[in-house]
Image (spheres, rainbow, N blue to C red):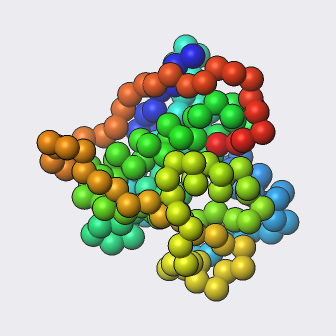
Amino acid sequence: MRIEIRQTPWDDAAGARLRADQERETLERYGADLEAGAKPSSDSVALFLTAHHADTGEAIGCGALRRIDDTAFEIKRMYVVPQWRGRRIGGLLLHALEEAGRERGATVVRLETGPLQPEAIRLYERCGYREIPQFGPYVGAPASVCFERRLTAPAGTAPQGDTPVGSARADTAPAGSAPA
């Protein structure tokens, strides 16, 4: 099975559906909207990516970058549809977001998740993220756990503004217990 990662407009219908599903799942876990700070929007995100099944075109995951400062981005709205979890799609999205950040001059990416999302925490740790003190709007937020990953420039390359678009093979094993 091949997965395509595409740059998608923020207001794209499939992307909007994925973000709504992500928000609904978060509300179910926490019982309330506990998101600290401004919600991401078309004005605040630098890039929005969606993951698609290459054969059917079905949108099955998403993630966005929001600039923090000249050298850092925050990853927002990471989500993989539940029946597609456990197939390394979250890792593909993270990698594509990191590459896009690197191409835009970032040396670090940060993110926030919550303690009731252990599968997301495992994904981030497996992908080389380390827990950090809460940053920005998350300082003092009891339902926030923050992570970051330092980026290194690929050997022999210079930052570019190209959009990451591509495909990769994802694990085709049955969905397991490790979402995103």
Q: Say if 11 sits above or below 36 in the image.
A: above
**x 31%, y 61%: residue:** 107
Tell me residue 31's x, y (percent).
85, 66
Tell me residue 59's x, y (percent).
59, 31
Tell me residue 24's x, y (percent).
76, 53
Which one is in front, 172 or 105?
172
Where residue 77 sits, quadrant-wise, is bottom right
Residue 119 visible in the displayed image: yes
**x 58%, y 54%: residue:** 125
**x 39%, y 49%: residue:** 98
Residue 161 visible in the displayed image: no
Where residue 53 sits, quadrant-wise, is top right
The C terminus is located in which quarter? top right
In the visual, does 47 lie left or right of 137?
left
The N terminus is located in which quarter? top right
Return the residue found at the far bottom: 140
Which one is in front, 168 or 33?
168
Tell me residue 74's x, y (percent).
46, 63
